[in-house]
Amino acid sequence: QAGRAGPEAQFRRFLSREGMTILVGRDRRQNDQLTLRVARGNDLWLHAGGGVGGSHVVVRVPRGKVASPETLLDAAHLALHYSQARGRPRAEVLWTQRKWVRKPKGLAPGQVRVDRSRTLLVEFDPELLARVLATAGGTEP
């Protein structure tokens, strides 16, 4: 998007309820760039679970802070919305800190290995998703 500088400008961008930036890759190459080049070690990384294809989602966690459960749920809804699980009443989302995500040589674009992840079973909430989507392009206050 024109006018915005920096490595984050090309990704879908949203704000969580507590004001943390959530970035979403648009395709396999962007997923790689977001996860491997833009995300920092303590940022949260999320992806639809169960072998479902979808976008990588990164929550920018400021140094010394921890994302709230509400922020995690906001990001999880985006991970499902931008995946093949879209439309399901409930689905799993894998999440971990970025430092536990790596890309061994030979993996296709968008594919990564996750060493330590947790699984969140998300009950789809259309109002929550609508509120997060309404923050598209948002910048931190």
Image (cartoon, helix red, strand yellow):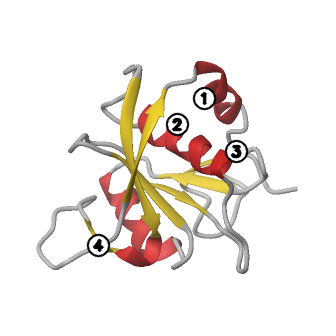
Residue occupying the point 52% across, 59% down:
58
Point out the residue furthest to the right here: 141
Q: Which mark is on residue 137?
A: 3
Residue at the image position 64 percent from the left and 70 percent from the top? 6
Element under disc 1:
helix
Given the image, on which type of amino acid does mark 1 rest? Leu
* Residue 1 visible in the picture: no
Vertical position of residue 24 compared to residue 35: above or below? above
Residue beneath disc 2: 77
Tell me which numbered mark, 1 or 3, is placed earlier along the sequence.
Answer: 1
Q: Which mark is residue 112?
A: none
Circle 4 sits on which residue? Answer: 115
Q: Nearer the viewer, mark 4 or mark 1?
A: 4
Q: Are marks 1 and 2 in contact (CB under 8 Å)?
A: yes
**Disc nearest the viewer among 4 and 3:** 4
- Residue at 46 percent of width and 35 percent of height: 122
Q: Secondary structure at mark 4?
A: loop
| Distance from the alpha carbon under mark 1 to that under mark 3 | 15 Å
Going by the numbered disc 4, the residue's amino acid type is: Asp
